[in-house]
Image: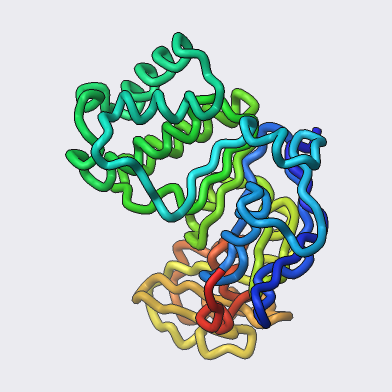
Amino acid sequence: MNVLKVDKIRKQFGDHVAVDEVSFSIDEGMIFGLIGPNGAGKTTSIRMIMNIIAPDSGNVSVMGNTDPRKHTDLIGYLPEERGLYRRMKIKDLLRFMTDLKQVSKVESAKAVDYWLERVELSEWKNKKVEELSKGMQQKIQFIGTILHKPKLLILDEPFGGLDPVNQILIKDILLDLKKQGTTIIFSTHVMESAEKLCEDILLINKSKQVLYGKLAEIKKSFGHQHLIIEYSGKDTFLDSKEIAHFDNYGNHVEIQLTKNGDAQKILKEAVTMADIQRFELKEPSLQEIFIETVGESAGEAGNE
């Protein structure tokens, strides 16, 4: 079942086309990666899904409903630009957030206590927001996004401001929500996080979608053009026409083959001049796919 369907949405601000006929759909219980360089159009796309701004053309459907007024309570949204009422107490702020989503007072109290304990902030519930660190505030805003049990959760750079321990905490919560059937859009330009969490991805660059589909299939389409060799001895085998680029760390080299490069030829040359401890062809990482697809244009984008 499609929880979200986006059909050829387009948005232009003056002479700048921010999003140009982007289309995708997301099934229930999936973590979907909306990725791209800064300024590619990710945040504008999210704002159209949230009905913060209306598309110039195209439409958005949530749970089969194209009327944005009827699906607001089905969505949880964590924007990249954080904002909390700094002088409110944590428990009051979170209960206020549930009031906005029509959650009963009994259910709200239970949810607030549960999630504060889950993110290890129970002892701070009577403190004001301004007394919390940036990372703590980030966790408060995150749980405020999920208190009402949304069917669709949209997260714009959710790990910003979090240390590695709390990044793992939030990641584990996201995986638990996925198991419970929550559909999650994970928007980021940090490819490592997207690769670990997402099943399907949409890569936007310069307002247009350039890659879309299952991450495993996208990786497969890029081929096994990457090679890792651990060795001792001479490294003259790296002077090969089969190699487009390599990073040699001394006894460990990472190689990108040419388009039609033959890894077996490299192996035959290497064993004649070095002792090979490891020889591994590997699929490209999402980071490598991102760089190959977007390239230098990533630094040329404007505001989203």
In the displayed structure image, the side of residue 270 where residue 249 appears, left or right: left
Q: Residue at x 51, y 14 (%)?
A: 104
Q: Position of residue 81 (x, y in %)?
A: 42, 55
The answer to whether residue 117 is above or below residue 215 is above
Q: Residue 55 falls in which quadrant of the image?
A: bottom right
Is residue 238 visible in the rendered structure shown here? Answer: yes
* Viewer can see residue 281: no
The image position of residue 23, as x and y in percent, is 78, 57
Instruction: Indicate left or right for 84 with 181 as reference.
Output: left
Q: Is residue 294 above or below residue 279?
A: below
Q: Residue at x 35, y 38 (%)?
A: 139
The residue closer to the viewer here, 116 or 247, is 116
Quadrant of res 17: bottom right
- On the picture, is 290 further left or further right than 127? right
Q: Residue at 77%, 60% (x, y): give it.
A: 9
Query: What colouring method underlies this structural image?
Result: rainbow
Q: Nearer the viewer, residue 48 or 232?
A: 48
Q: Residue 53 at x, y = what percent?
A: 64, 56
Q: Quadrant of the N terminus?
A: top right
In the rendered image, the residue lying farthest to the top is 106
Q: Residue at x 80, y 42 (%)?
A: 66
Which of 270/263 is in front?
263
The percent coordinates of residue 116 (x first, y second) are 33, 24
